[in-house]
Structure formats: structure tokens, C-alpha cells
Amino acid sequence: MTPYDVVVLAGGAARRLGGADKPGVSVGGRALLDRVLGACREAGRTVVVGGRRATVRPVVWAREEPPGSGPLAALAAGVRHVEADTVVVLSGDLPFLRDGGVRKLADALAGGSAEGVLSVDPDGRDQPLVAAYRTEPLRRELALLATEHGNLTGLPLRLLVQELDVLRIPAEPLASFDCDTWEDIATARATIREHGNVLDEWITAVKDELGIELDVDTGVLLDLARDAAHGVARPAAPLTTFLVGYAAAQAAGNGPEAVSQAVAEAARKAAALADRWANEAADGTGTGKGTGTGPGKGTDNGTGSGTDNGAGAG
């Protein structure tokens, strides 16, 4: 895989948000900046240009001088801290960016001779802040623009793009959706709660909140919860998945891959156990038939029918 660093531009005045702290605005329970950082886990180094704040993962902080002098000045400040030959450049307000989309940009650049790879949104517009660049050509053109114009303050990004040899690729679905207005924020918040998105969004949010960088097959866990609920009892579902997680945690010292395998194996065993419970109940040899030891007749509290006659027949 192509090694790369990331520069995230998280400054700006957010005028269309009434001057709100845009990187800190919550979408799906997570700050916009943290959502972007969550897509950059594979980066060798992540540089954030903007005001310092608590973040979900460690970053290198940078700041353009003077603050608020525009995206080119901010980009130049961030690129000074880049060490890799490839840098992915992102804005800090992309709620639906995923790590696969970031990797796609880096790999597309590595696979050709272009100096940059730009995402193109569904309306055909270039997205220079959802892009990957070769670090040295990027530094070269930023320096040339600063020399030509005296400084980079207020210069538009298109001046940089038109000087580079760039490849354009379609953006991943929603990857280039940014939040410039409160209407955009409302749309993003509604989108993550749609049926097809909400579960993945929630799992990602929980992992970020707990500091877990682990990919597991959520389908397996959901199937296990269903089997435990139906074959045993409804409260068995969350307790069983908790125990699977505890079993997997015992493999934590062997790395994330071992943990993922441990989750799959523990889920398989627990699902098989739940299946055996269900089969026993179905054939009448489970909770409906006991070993009653009471001396008199009483109502059987199992799932079978009939009354207890002291011999346990239900």
C-alpha cells in the first residue's frame, strides 16, 4: 500500500454558520473534525491546520500566518510538516468520508504519473480539498504562487490546481459532501439516521468513542444476538455479545487481526450453543421437561404443558 500523510484544513471563519466553531459541530454524536480524522487511520502523519482542540486521535498542529488568510496559506502551513512523498488533502467538514475513499485517492496517485488526483463531485465540480498530491510538486507550486503574488493570502485553490498535472476521478458516494451551512448540517444529521446508514454510523461512533480501532463482522454479531434472543431468552442477546467481546479481549495482546479472528470464533461457538438450546426446546427435551422432586402436584413453570406429578413430566 502507498504510504501517505494527511493535511486537514480545519480553520476558516465559518461565516455561513454564523461564525460557529465548525470543526466542533456534532454530526452523529461526533465532531466534524473527528469524523474526518476517523477516515485517516492509515496515514503516517496527520497534520491539522487550525485552532488546537481535543481530538479523537493524536495529530500534528499547524497554523497559517496570519490566521484566516485562506486555504492556500493554510495548505502551505500544513505541507511544511509532511514527511511522506504523497499527501492527501482534506477539508475538516466532510461527515461521510471513509478510510476506503482516502486510500483510493492515494492509490490512484501512485498508479500513474499525475502530480495530483482530484475528486469530482456528482455535479462535476473539482474538489481540491478531497484530493491527493505528490508532496514536492505541491510545495513547488505553492512557493511559486507565493513568489508571484507576494504571499498566499486570499488566493483561490484553483490557481494551484491549474498549475499541476492532475487526474480527476469520481468521488465516492457522499465523500465530497461538506457542511458549509446549517442546512448542510441538518441534511448530514438526517442522512446518518436513515435505515441504510444508521447501524454502520453508530458502530463507527462507538468505536471512536471507546478508542477501538478494530474491524469485525457486525453481521455475525447481529446473527448471534438474534439466535440468543430467539433460542434462549431476549436478555441473552446483549449478554452473549458482551461475553464474546470479553473472550476476544483476551487475544488483544496478539494484535487487531487476532482479535477479529477471536470474535469470529467466539461468535461461532456461542451461536452453535444457542442453536442447541433452541433445538432442545423444540423437541421437548429442554426447559419443558424437568426432574421434578416435589412431593405433590404443582404447576410446571417450564415451557412444556401439563402439571408436575412429582416425577417431573411436563
Image (tube, rainbow, N blue to C red):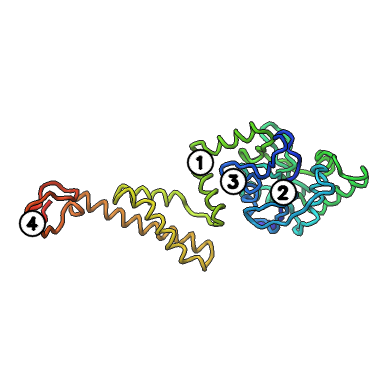
Q: Amino acid at mark 3?
A: Arg
Q: Position of residue 188 (x, y in %)?
A: 60, 36
18 and 291: which is toward the camera: 18
Tag 4 residue: 310
Q: Position of residue 26 (x, y in %)?
A: 61, 42
Q: Residues within 10 Å of mark 4 (few under 14, many from 20)?
A: some
Going from N to C along the chain, the mark reached first, 2 or 1, is: 2
Tag 3 and tag 2, C-beta contact below 8 Å:
no
Q: Residue at x 55, y 52 (%)?
A: 209
How far apart are labels 2 and 1 at the CA level? 26 Å
**Is residue 42 found left or right of 168 in the rendered image?**
left
How many callouts does the rendering have? Answer: 4
| Mark 1 or mark 4, whichever is nearer to me | 4
| Mark 2 or mark 4, whichever is nearer to me | 4
Tag 1 and tag 4, C-beta contact below 8 Å:
no
Q: Residues within 10 Å of mark 1 (few under 14, many from 20)?
A: some
Tag 2 residue: 8
- When the figure is inspected, residue 270 is found, relative to residue 167, above or below; the finding is below
Tag 3 residue: 30
